Image: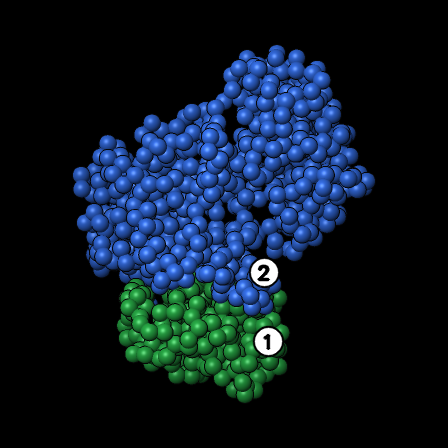
């Protein structure tokens, strides 16, 4: 038997004699957050002997201790709805009314149901070691009640959020964004008293590597300190800072299946879904230049960032590759980072917990390895509760978090194939669906797009150039140049949030195509002292913003950062231009004055963090030359 | 990361923070929870005795800030609102702290102490010349508390539940006494059932938040384990300011 522990940041494995565990369970659930709390309840209701281990003092994670009182998309259906229904009777009667989800009532009810089902709960406890028979997890060491106890299990469900137990067990994993390893911004939630009950505010507070505890601790202190501006108001009495900060991404296991955004768009998805996740690719953070090309094509160039997608989730996403007796359930499941920004919503994470518990039950009941769990049996169980439902396969939709629509408005997205339909849409300020349709059609539509480049309709010309560039055709470059040199401030209108400006869309695409003709213009954008004084960066009436943040100039940041990244891409493809580009980038960022042009916010803020990170990552990219 | 400190403080409590501030640079606070000041703030214990306090200059400044920010007035405090003020001071001073970190063992060694700690980065051993543990010791009493809002009639103490007024007449804390062996789950379930069956003027009041931590009372320190290692339970003090002050004075050599 192996004992796997982490010591001084490194996972170490040592052979141990066969272990007599202090106590043995069928299922150990590590982390009783959004997914883990549901996993513990469902597994216990199946008659399994369940132990839930939680480092905090309550169940529910970000949905209770994290102060988040409402859902953001995700799909309906599943056992969690029973809990959400049951807690309504307490709202305003025992617990102060809280709007959509009464987190205090939920904290109570999750625990109530887990205990009634027979689950045992250890709060203030953490797993610090994993026992394995080769690659099968058989038990854990737990720091609890002033000591360390050894606990045997048939299945371990890792719902710690960052797959900490999978990591200790030696499972393969990836972390953060591919280019720079960074995570999305985290949130710090403030709960206050309002008329009729309690409310919360939820704001992005910074970037953190939560696996670095010094850094995490500083982030907690800093982000909670930011709420000081709200403590004075007696008309809005400050109740508390939510003890759990809202981390959005981190470690993801490499599973038996791994869904990527590219694969999703190409239709490489499972035909054996265990549930359908549903949301937009809700990736927070302004520095999209370091996102993957596919994500930038979708969110930036096609301006479809707020379009909801439906992602079928497979059993293999839960199973760490090559391992048995262990599942990841939560945002740490096996996806690439792009897809994980959609799949991580609370409704769907609760589903993940339900799926994991049922997988564990079948594996134990049938005496099979996790990879051999019967899909038919699992699907039947999940359909009973609505966790798996064909009605949740909603495709692509322009949706709204309130999910209220005008009657008769069709918000579903169908990709276009008819050139007249495409032309019609490209002629508007909502060209997104047409743009992506062109990308899907590829060479079939390039000749038509080339014709439209000469049209008198400005939108049609511009968007045809964007469409050509999305396809990878350089025929639209001259029109892209117009948008770049004119600093085109036209804001597309497809989405309810995060609509993009044509000017930096064009810069991104010119860079992708390795356009050498635009180099001097891009150098001007990043290095000319006059650039920052252009009206586009200083007149909010010209562009407007969805998020208004004091001390941060997003329009300038986007033009600046996309120009730098485009120059790097052009330099990657053109050795002869590298010295010129390198000198220009050095002059633009070496002296750090660019930072103040972009943001005056403090050094712990997400905005400051992205301007520092820009310099670091660009330096790394150029160093490869 | 450093491996040796002049002073390691166990518990990001008010006493622990006070000691860290007074000690200066070569200090580390180690805290199991993701919070500071939880022994008052996190258990919604507003404390008492804010009037008639003689405090050292640093803590008197903290008190003045609470008053200026309308968190403390006329001897009454909005305890949750103390939190950002505390964090802002910790941030300004860049106090070294490891949250979500357990101390699994402490050993006396020549010249000081070895502490085994565990967090998401794994096991690690750090050493210190001195250790101050500010967590509870020899607990005498325990309660689960909750913030109450919505009522007009002041609630009256009843059968194991006492009520403490917050900053305004519309804010109270209820404290439900518990057996020392009571778990969080038992406590939460009991409080829920007690509140569900409340009668009279208590029905005006609803729970805005149930505390994530127990309130403990225990004997004041310092309690000496061995030379250089003492216990100074922060929860033993009347209110956060007294705890901060005692920790500050202890580490500043006041005792």
Residue B72 on image: x %, y %: 55, 76
Residue B64 in sight from this viewpoint: yes
Q: Do discs 1 and 2 share a chain?
A: no
Give the letter of the green chain.
B
Which residue is rendered at x = 43% and y = 29% of the image? A395
Residue A369 in sight from this viewpoint: no
Task: Name the residue tied to disc 1.
Answer: B67
Q: Nearer the viewer, residue A620 or B110?
A: A620
Residue A205 on image: x %, y %: 56, 53
**Mark 2 secondary-structure assignment:** helix
Give the letter of the blue chain.
A
Q: Nearer the viewer, residue A545 or B18?
A: A545
Which residue is rendered at x = 27% and y = 38% of the image? A382
Q: Residue furthest right?
A: A530
Q: Nearer the viewer, residue A397 or A365?
A: A397
Instruction: Please tell me whether residue A64 is drawn above or below residue B171 in the rendered image.
Output: above
Looking at the rendered image, the quarter that the C terminus of chain A falls into is top right
Q: Residues within 10 Å of mark 1 (few under 14, many from 20)?
A: some
Residue B63 on image: x %, y %: 58, 78
Q: Nearer the viewer, mark 1 or mark 2?
A: 1
Which residue is rendered at x = 60% and y = 36% of the image? A499
**Mark 1 secondary-structure assignment:** helix
**Chain hosting mark 1:** B
Residue A21 on image: x %, y %: 22, 57
Q: Label 2 near label 1: C-beta < 8 Å?
A: no
User: Distance from label 1 to label 2 (Cα)?
Assistant: 18 Å
Task: Name the residue tied to disc 2.
Answer: A226
**Chain hosting mark 2:** A
């Amino acid at each position: 038997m192996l004992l796997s522990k982490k010591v001084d940041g490194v996972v170490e494995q040592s052979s141990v004699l066969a272990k007599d565990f202090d106590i043995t369970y069928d299922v150990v659930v590590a982390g009783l957050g959004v997914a883990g709390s549901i996993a513990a309840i469902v597994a216990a209701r199946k008659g399994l002997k369940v132990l839930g281990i939680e480092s905090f003092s309550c169940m529910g994670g970000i949905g209770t201790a994290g102060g988040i009182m409402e859902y953001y998309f995700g799909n309906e259906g599943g056992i969690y709805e029973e809990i959400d229904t049951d807690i309504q009777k307490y709202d305003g009667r025992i617990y102060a009314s809280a709007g959509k989800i009464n987190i205090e009532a939920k904290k109570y009810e999750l625990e109530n149901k887990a205990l009634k089902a027979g689950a045992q709960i250890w709060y203030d406890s953490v797993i610090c070691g994993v026992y394995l028979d080769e690659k099968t997890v058989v038990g854990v060491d737990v720091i609890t009640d002033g000591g360390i106890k050894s606990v045997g299990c048939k299945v371990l469900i890792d719902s710690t959020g960052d797959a900490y137990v999978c990591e200790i067990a030696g499972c393969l994993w990836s972390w953060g964004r591919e280019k720079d390893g960074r995570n999305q911004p985290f949130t710090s939630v403030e709960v206050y008293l309002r008329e009729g009950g309690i409310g919360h505010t939820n704001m992005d507070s910074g970037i953190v590597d939560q696996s670095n505890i010094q850094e995490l601790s500083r982030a907690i202190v800093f982000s909670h300190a930011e709420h000081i501006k709200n403590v004075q108001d007696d008309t809005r009495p400050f109740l508390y800072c939510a003890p759990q900060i809202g981390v959005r991404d981190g470690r993801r296991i490499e599973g038996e299946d791994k869904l990527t955004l590219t694969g999703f768009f190409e239709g490489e998805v499972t035909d054996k879904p265990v549930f359908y996740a549903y949301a937009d690719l809700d990736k927070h953070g302004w520095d999209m230049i370091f996102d993957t090309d596919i994500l930038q094509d979708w969110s930036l160039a096609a301006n479809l960032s707020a379009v909801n997608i439906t992602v079928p989730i497979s059993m293999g996403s839960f199973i760490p590759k090559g391992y048995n007796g262990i599942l990841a359930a939560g945002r740490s499941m096996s996806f690439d980072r792009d897809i994980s920004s959609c799949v991580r919503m609370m409704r769907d994470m609760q589903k993940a917990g339900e799926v994991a518990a049922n997988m564990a039950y079948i594996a134990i009941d049938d005496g099979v390895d996790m990879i051999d769990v019967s899909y038919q049996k699992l699907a039947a169980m999940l359909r009973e509760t609505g966790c798996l439902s064909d009605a949740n396969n909603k495709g692509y939709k322009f949706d709204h978090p309130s999910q209220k629509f005008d009657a008769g408005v069709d918000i579903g997205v169908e990709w276009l194939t008819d050139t007249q339909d495409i032309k019609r849409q490209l002629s508007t300020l909502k060209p997104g669906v047409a743009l992506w349709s062109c990308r899907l059609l590829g060479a079939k539509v390039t000749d038509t797009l080339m014709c439209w480049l000469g049209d008198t309709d400005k939108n049609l010309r511009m968007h045809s150039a964007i469409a050509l560039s999305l396809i990878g055709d350089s025929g639209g470059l001259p029109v892209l140049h117009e948008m770049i040199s004119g600093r085109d401030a036209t804001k597309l209108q497809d989405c309810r949030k995060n609509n993009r400006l044509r000017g930096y869309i064009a810069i991104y695409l010119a860079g992708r195509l390795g356009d050498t003709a635009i180099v001097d213009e891009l150098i001007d954008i990043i290095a000319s002292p006059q650039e920052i004084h252009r009206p586009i960066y200083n007149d909010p009436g010209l562009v407007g913003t969805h998020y208004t943040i004091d001390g941060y100039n997003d329009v300038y940041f986007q033009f600046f950062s996309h120009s730098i990244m485009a120059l790097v891409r052009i330099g990657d493809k053109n050795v002869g231009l590298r010295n010129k580009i390198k000198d220009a980038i050095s002059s633009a960022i070496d002296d750090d004055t660019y930072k103040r042009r972009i943001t005056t916010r403090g050094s712990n803020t997400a905005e400051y963090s992205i301007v520092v990170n820009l310099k670091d990552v660009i330096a790394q990219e150029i160093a490869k030359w | 990361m450093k491996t040796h400190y002049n002073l390691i403080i166990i518990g990001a409590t008010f006493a622990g923070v006070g000691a860290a501030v007074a000690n200066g640079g070569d200090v580390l606070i180690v805290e199991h929870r993701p919070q500071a000041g939880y022994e008052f703030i996190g258990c919604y214990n507003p404390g008492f005795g804010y009037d008639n306090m003689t405090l050292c200059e640093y803590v008197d400044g903290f008190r003045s800030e609470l008053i200026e920010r309308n968190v403390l007035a006329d001897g009454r405090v909005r305890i949750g609102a103390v939190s950002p003020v505390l964090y802002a001071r910790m941030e300004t001073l860049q106090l070294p702290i490891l949250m979500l970190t357990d101390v699994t063992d402490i050993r006396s060694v020549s010249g000081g102490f070895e502490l085994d700690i565990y967090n998401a980065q794994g096991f690690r051993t750090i050493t210190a010349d001195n250790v101050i543990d500010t967590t509870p010791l020899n607990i005498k009493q325990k309660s689960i508390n909750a913030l109450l809002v919505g009522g007009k009639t002041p609630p009256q103490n009843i059968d194991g539940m006492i009520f403490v007024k917050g900053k305004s007449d519309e804010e109270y804390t209820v404290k439900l006494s518990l057996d020392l062996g009571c778990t969080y789950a038992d406590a939460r379930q009991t409080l829920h059932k007690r509140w569900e069956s409340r009668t009279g003027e208590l029905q005006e009041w609803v729970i805005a938040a149930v505390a994530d931590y127990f309130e403990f009372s225990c004997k004041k320190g310092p309690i000496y384990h061995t030379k250089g290692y003492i216990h100074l339970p922060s929860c033993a003090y009347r209110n956060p300011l007294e705890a901060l002050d005692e920790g500050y004075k202890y580490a500043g050599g006041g005792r």
